[in-house]
Image (cartoon, rainbow, N blue to C red):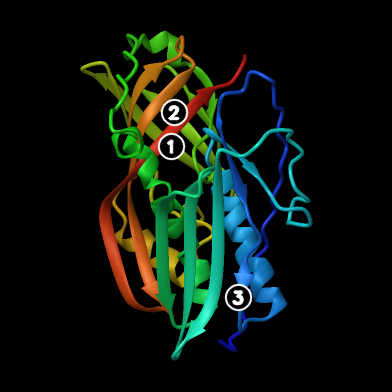
């Protein structure tokens, strides 16, 4: 592997208020099994894994003792386990992420092969998102998909205020007259417009693309997206007594290896949820 990873600063904060009645699924991340790499590279990969999994607002993530956040104290048995490993193979690095349930049944396996650990780090977000796709298909787990909850009627006035929960975004402020703002964790703001059609909230980016919208991608890749990316969009329905927007985020993504073999993917879709904050 031999190449030094680009230095990236990640501030990973695990502030979790857990109640006894919390019914979110509990995932325990096991320590990275790293072979043929430096301790610094292994620690950076672990930090990325923990950070991206912790972006999932509908789960609880338990970290191993001594992990980047020191572990989250939570007295319960995990529902699922996340195992990761890194090893050299020929002239490449292979990263593997496996999700299994409490009965050791494998639910998801993601295997990524790249030239360097740097490439794995830069594509970790996509790997983690792919590892969670099995949760979108309950029938695959139980053989029978539960009935989805009925969406509530969207009343524009009930949307006004602050929301949180989307990856890379600290806050979203929805205003009257079809306007909104997204405040990114990277420090920039994005202006949005929205409209309600067929009881679906459609939100669209109207600000010009900015490199900081795509943090933590490296600057060369972010600049490509500034020129190539289509406006981000969200499609939501309303649930849980007007406190939860649930649906999809549609955006342009980039996949690359060692700054080569660049692939731009428009209309990439992933799950998204916004939770309304108290006034």
- In this rendering, position of residue 202 left or right of residue 127: left
| Res 6 label | 3
Residue 73 in view of the camera: yes
Tag 2's secondary structure? strand
Q: Nearer the viewer, mark 2 or mark 3?
A: 3
Q: Quadrant of the N terminus?
A: bottom right
- In this rendering, position of residue 233 left or right of residue 40: left
Query: Does residue 151 lie above or below 55 as drawn?
Result: above
**Residue at mark 2:** 180
Q: Looking at the picture, tell me which residue is in the foreground, 132 or 103.
A: 103
The answer to whether mark 3 and mark 1 are in CB contact below 8 A is no
Query: Does residue 225 lie above or below 94 as drawn?
Result: above
Q: Counting residues from the N terminus, which is met first, the one under dot 2 or under dot 1?
A: 2
| Res 191 label | 1
Tag 1's secondary structure? strand
The residue lying at 62 percent from left, 23 percent from top is 22
* Dot 1 alpha-carbon crowd within 10 angstroms: few under 14, some 14 to 19, many 20 or more: some
Q: Quadrant of the C terminus?
A: top right
The residue lying at 62 percent from left, 42 percent from top is 61
C-alpha separation, residue under disc 2 versus residue under disc 1: 6 Å
Q: Counting residues from the N terminus, which is met first, the one under dot 3 or under dot 1?
A: 3
Query: Does residue 43 lie above or below 74 as drawn?
Result: below
């Amino acid at each position: 592997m031999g190449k030094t990873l680009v230095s990236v600063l990640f501030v990973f904060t695990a502030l979790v208020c857990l109640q006894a009645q919390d019914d979110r699924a509990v995932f325990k991340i096991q320590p990275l099994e790293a072979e043929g790499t430096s301790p610094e590279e292994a620690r950076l990969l672990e930090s990325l894994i923990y950070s991206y999994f912790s972006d999932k607002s509908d789960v609880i993530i338990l970290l191993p003792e001594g992990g980047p956040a020191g572990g989250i104290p939570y007295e319960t048995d995990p529902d699922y386990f996340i195992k990761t490993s890194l090893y050299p193979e020929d002239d490449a690095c292979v990263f593997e992420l496996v999700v299994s349930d409490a009965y050791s049944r494998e639910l998801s396996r993601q295997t990524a092969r790249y030239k360097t650990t740097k490439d794995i780090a830069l594509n970790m977000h996509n790997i983690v998102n792919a590892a969670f796709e099995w949760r979108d298909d309950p029938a695959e787990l139980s053989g029978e998909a539960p009935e989805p909850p009925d969406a509530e009627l969207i009343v524009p006035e009930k949307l006004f205020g602050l929301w949180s929960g989307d990856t890379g975004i600290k806050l979203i402020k929805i205003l009257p007259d079809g306007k909104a703002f997204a405040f990114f964790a990277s420090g920039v703001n994005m202006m949005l417009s929205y409209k309600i059609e067929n009881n679906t909230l459609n939100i669209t980016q109207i600000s010009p693309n900015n490199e900081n919208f795509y943090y933590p991608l490296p600057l060369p890749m972010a600049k490509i997206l500034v020129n190539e990316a289509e406006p981000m969009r969200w499609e939501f329905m309303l649930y849980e007594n007007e406190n939860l927007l649930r649906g999809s985020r549609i955006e342009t993504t980039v996949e690359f290896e060692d700054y080569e073999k660049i692939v731009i993917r428009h209309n990439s879709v992933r799950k998204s949820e916004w939770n309304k904050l108290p006034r």
